[in-house]
Image (cartoon, helix red, strand yellow):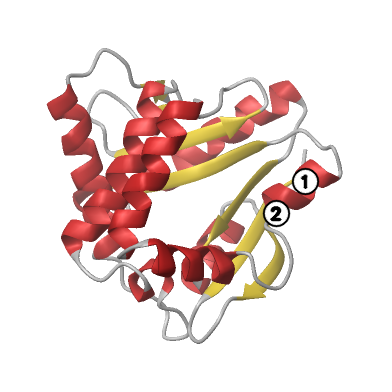
């Protein structure tokens, strides 16, 4: 796992495009629509993911697998950083645009937080330290070659050194099953509306 730095704005934008394509082209489980329920076009997905990738990169929280950049990871939490205030505000503005305005963004946030708090909010309320995988994507041409496993194992090593659990949430049952196969445990499933579920996962130390 390699932290990305020294990139040009165009290189960061290209990463955002690759991440957006990986999410937009993903084939969801029949029970889930995930982000696609709220983000209707490829360009809107790019706007949404570009905001996340830009904030992650500027905050020193964006990682890749190797010099070949087969996959990308945004990691936050104990000792690895957090998104700065101004980058966070830019991210919120871009997400609002991608979702089609304030009303749609409000509905999206309401859905995501339905049936209780996210696993991150519950961990914070319990005053527990953690690492959180904010985003993980493998470029389509490298999928099925073990890069997701490799990135997770690297995160687990960092977490074990810090003595903290790893958490994430995802919007698809098949993704959740894959994470469980690779060492995480399903904490809970939040029913966020028709064909929209959030799967909270944790890997304890």
Q: Residue furthest top?
A: 6
| In-image side of 68 versus 138 (left or right) | left
User: Whole-percent x and y of residue 70?
Assistant: 27, 38
Quadrant where the N terminus sits is top left
Q: Which residue is mark 1?
A: 123
Q: Count how many numbered circles sit on residues in the image.
A: 2
**Callout 2: SS:** helix
The residue shown at (58%, 76%) is 192
Q: Residues within 10 Å of mark 2 (few under 14, many from 20)?
A: some
The residue shown at (45%, 38%) is 150
Q: Quadrant of residue 15?
A: top left
| In-image side of 75 versus 7 (left or right) | right
**Callout 1: SS:** helix
The residue shown at (71%, 35%) is 130
Q: Quadrant of residue 128?
A: top right
User: Whole-percent x and y of residue 187?
Assistant: 73, 62
| In-image side of 103 versus 113 (left or right) | left
- Using the image, determine if residue 91 lies above or below residue 158: below
Circle 1/circle 2 CB separation < 8 Å: yes
Q: Which residue is mark 2?
A: 119
| In-image side of 54 versus 124 (left or right) | left
- Using the image, determine if residue 171 lies above or below residue 182: below
User: Whole-percent x and y of residue 36?
Assistant: 33, 71
Instruction: Judge whether residue 124 can be spotted in this image.
Output: yes
Q: Residue furthest front?
A: 102
Relative to the observer, which residue lies in front, 3 or 194? 194
């Amino acid at each position: 796992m390699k932290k990305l730095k020294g990139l040009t704005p165009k290189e960061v934008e290209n990463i955002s495009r690759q991440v957006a394509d990986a999410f937009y082209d993903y084939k969801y489980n029949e029970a889930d629509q995930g982000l696609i329920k709220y983000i209707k076009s490829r360009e809107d997905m790019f706007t949404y993911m570009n905001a996340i990738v830009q904030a992650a990169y500027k905050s020193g929280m964006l990682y890749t697998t190797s010099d070949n950049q087969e996959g990308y990871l945004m990691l936050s939490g104990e000792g690895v950083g957090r998104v700065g205030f101004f980058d966070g505000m830019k991210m919120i503005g871009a997400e609002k645009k991608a979702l089609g305005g304030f009303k749609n963004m409000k509905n999206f946030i309401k859905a995501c937080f339905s049936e209780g708090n996210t696993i991150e909010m519950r961990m914070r309320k319990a005053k527990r330290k953690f690492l959180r995988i904010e985003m993980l994507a493998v470029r389509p041409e490298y999928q099925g070659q073990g890069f997701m496993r490799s990135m997770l194992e690297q995160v687990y090593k960092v977490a074990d050194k810090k003595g903290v659990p790893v958490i994430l949430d995802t919007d698809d049952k098949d993704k959740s099953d894959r994470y469980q196969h690779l060492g995480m445990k399903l904490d809970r499933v939040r029913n966020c509306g028709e064909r929209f579920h959030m799967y909270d996962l944790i890997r304890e130390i």
